[in-house]
Image (cartoon, rainbow, N blue to C red):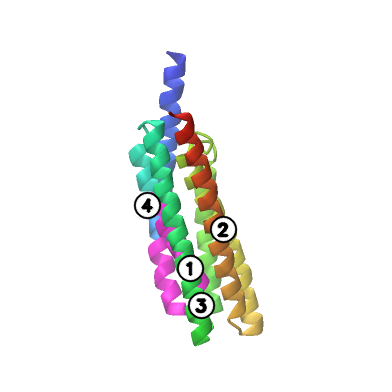
Amino acid sequence: MGDHAHHDHSLDVARKALTIALVLNFSMFALELWQGIISGSTSLIADSMDFLSDSFSYIITLYVLEKTLRVRAHASLIKAGLMLLLAAGALGQGIFNLINNETPDYWTMGWVATLALIINIYSAYLLYSSRTRDSNMESVWLCSRNDAIANAAIIIAALFVYLTNALWPDLIVALIITWLGGSSALRIISHAKKELANDK
């Protein structure tokens, strides 16, 4: 009885954290994409795609939260594939800006990234206690953690864009975001494959 109550409580905690994080992340996706397009910032657009990816991840995770381990593991593989796709998109946007030599607006980069950093730190905090439940919860926690790192990097990039009036700081951060997303996706795939192997 006690174990069942604890199980239900852990599910409730995870569900509440996911719901709050979903609302915050989708709101930030819309804001960052809008401001990224206006300012011409590759790193902001790349980060907005991370917020969109996270939002889809939260929806999928909420849906499979009480499903079998096999179903949850397959959901993790889908989310990892989405993360790889968005990482490739961020890289493509960076190459486009490099070809067109577009220097982003450092002020917009700075304030949007600061707001995003606060949102991601809070999301990571909410999800921290549930991160070890399975590959699904690990994936959403990793996404929030990665985004917080990316936001801090964008703030630094905004400073260097201001100092140098050059494109390269923004491009470097876009590459960092790409690497974070890709490496985390591979980690999630590895975890999910282990879960599937153990569930036979």
Q: In the rendered structure, which disc, 2 or 4, sits on the residue that comes first in sequence? A: 4
In the picture of the structure, the residue carrying the numbered disc 2 is 180
- Separation of residues labelled 1 and 4 (CA atoms): 17 Å
Q: Position of residue 88 (x, y in %)?
A: 47, 65
- Separation of residues labelled 1 and 2 (CA atoms): 11 Å
In the picture of the structure, the residue carrying the numbered disc 1 is 90
Residue farthest left in this picture: 63
Asked if disc 1 and disc 3 are in contact, CB closer than 8 Å, the reply is no
Front disc: 3 or 4: 3
Q: In the image, what residue occupies the spot 61% across and 65% down?
A: 153
Q: In the image, what residue occupies the spot 62% across and 75% down?
A: 169
Task: Tell me if mark 3 has few (under 14), some (14-19) or many (20+) residues whose alpha carbon lies within 10 angstroms of its own.
Answer: some
Identify the element where label 1 is drawn. Answer: helix
Quarter of the C terminus within the rendering: top left
Does the segment drawn in magenta span residue 139? no
- Separation of residues labelled 2 and 3 (CA atoms): 18 Å
Q: In the rendered structure, which disc, 1 or 2, sits on the residue that comes first in sequence? A: 1
In the picture of the structure, the residue carrying the numbered disc 4 is 56
Q: In the rendered structure, which disc, 2 or 3, sits on the residue that comes first in sequence? A: 3
Q: In the rendered structure, which disc, 1 or 4, sits on the residue that comes first in sequence? A: 4
Identify the element where label 4 is drawn. Answer: helix
Q: Position of residue 70 (x, y in %)?
A: 39, 34
Q: Amino acid at mark 4?
A: Phe
Q: In the image, what residue occupies the spot 41% across and 62% down?
A: 29
Q: Does residue 95 lie above or below 138 as drawn?
A: below
Asked if disc 1 and disc 4 are in contact, CB closer than 8 Å, the reply is no
Number of the label disc, if any, that sits on residue 95: 3
Identify the element where label 2 is drawn. Answer: helix
Residue span colored magenta: 29-57
Front disc: 2 or 4: 2
